[in-house]
Amino acid sequence: MEGKKRTLTKWLYWFVFAVAVILVYKTVDNLGEISIWFKKLFSILMPFVIGILIAYLFYIPARNLEKTYSRIKNKFIKKRARGIAIFTIYIIAMMVIVLIINFIVPTIIESIKDLISNFQTYYNETITVLNNLPEDSFLKNEIIYKLAEQIKNIDIEKYFNFEQLAQYAKGAINIVTSIFDIFVSVIVSVYILLERDQIIRFLKSLTKRLFKERTYNNIVNYFDQTNNIFFHFISSQLLDGIIVGIITSIAMQIMGVKYAILLGFMIGLFNLIPYFGAIIAVIIAAIITIFTGGFNQAIWMVIVVTILQQIDANIINPKITGNSLKISPLLVIFAVTVGGAYFGVLGMFLAVPIIAVLKLLIEDYIKWRKANINIYIKIGISVKGRLSYKPYRNIDKSAK
């Protein structure tokens, strides 16, 4: 029990230390040379970080596929099951990326271009519709007109200047598609997947040398639980976002909503953010649909998308994610808010698994405290209202 206490305490200390390091980094982000040095270091390490993330995401699919290949009687395949499984996973990933780049990305870009170039026309048509409404219509009020005026005054070119976007895209492509960076990332991920048993054995051996056996067992246990929480959450959220994006795009196409693929993609992407994402996506989609298809179509679109989101929240998402995290909705909202305030969209996305890990540590610590107090009461000696302490090894000896 002492070992578990020390392990829990260390995990809490390390968590607080990690949070402190991140906050310090955010504080010094704009402090001249230190910030530049950190950014250079981060850019150097980026290919390795990407490689580790790729290996992390591909680990379970590759492991399951390896088991399938290992059951095949062919000696050649059975002997090289791991390598063939990794090769298969990468081929599938490349096919998906090529499919997205060739079919989905061009459609989304064209939709954005068309929306921006015709925005003024859509705005004028919407105002005309508003002016022609009966005087007693609930839509014909000062709030709606002010909202429309504010939307008109948004400098879309500021956010979607395609000349600048082209330059940014070119720079991003030069960085992201750098042969060296891609090569390093792929090699790192493949090496981790191929040599994962040796890497795990090395890390376990190192941890075992640094800590006592009980502490080591607790560290391994917490690491496994943390890994399961993060992988399960990330993979299930990505799958759920893809499903929501596809069914929403199909539903909008059937309804005749303009830019259906763009709006469906946006809703699926925002769906990755718990609670807030779905609401934000529907509001944006409704505003765009008002300008491109009118109020009636926007209302029907909101109704259909809301129904689909309820189906996802109550049927699809629970089937994919289960109820393994068991976190209060209020706690999730708090975590997402704090994560978004400090670390933007990524913070909002990762807030849930982080708070789940912290909740796990706190719950285990509380259980340990309760068990500890019960044992003290059982052995029992109270001196002036304070419980005396006896090491567990002494308790065991006395019991014998």
Image (spheres, rainbow, N blue to C red):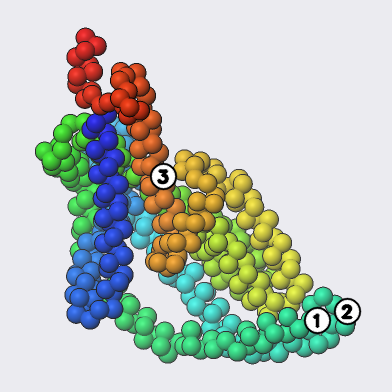
Relative to 344, is 62 on the left or the right? left
Residue type, mark 2 in image: Asp
Residue, far left: 209
Relative to 398, is 85 on the left or the right? right
Which residue is label 2 attached to? 136
Front-most of 118 and 139? 139
In which quarter of the view is residue 173 placed?
A: bottom left
Which residue is label 1 attached to? 140
Relative to 356, is 118 on the left or the right? right
Residue type, mark 1 in image: Lys
Residue 359: image tag: 3
Q: Position of residue 261 (x, y in %)?
A: 57, 69
Q: Are marks 1 and 2 in contact (CB under 8 Å)?
A: yes
Give me the residue at 66% from left, 71% from top: 286
Q: Position of residue 38 (x, y in %)?
A: 21, 72
Q: Earlier in the sequence, mark 1 or mark 3?
A: 1
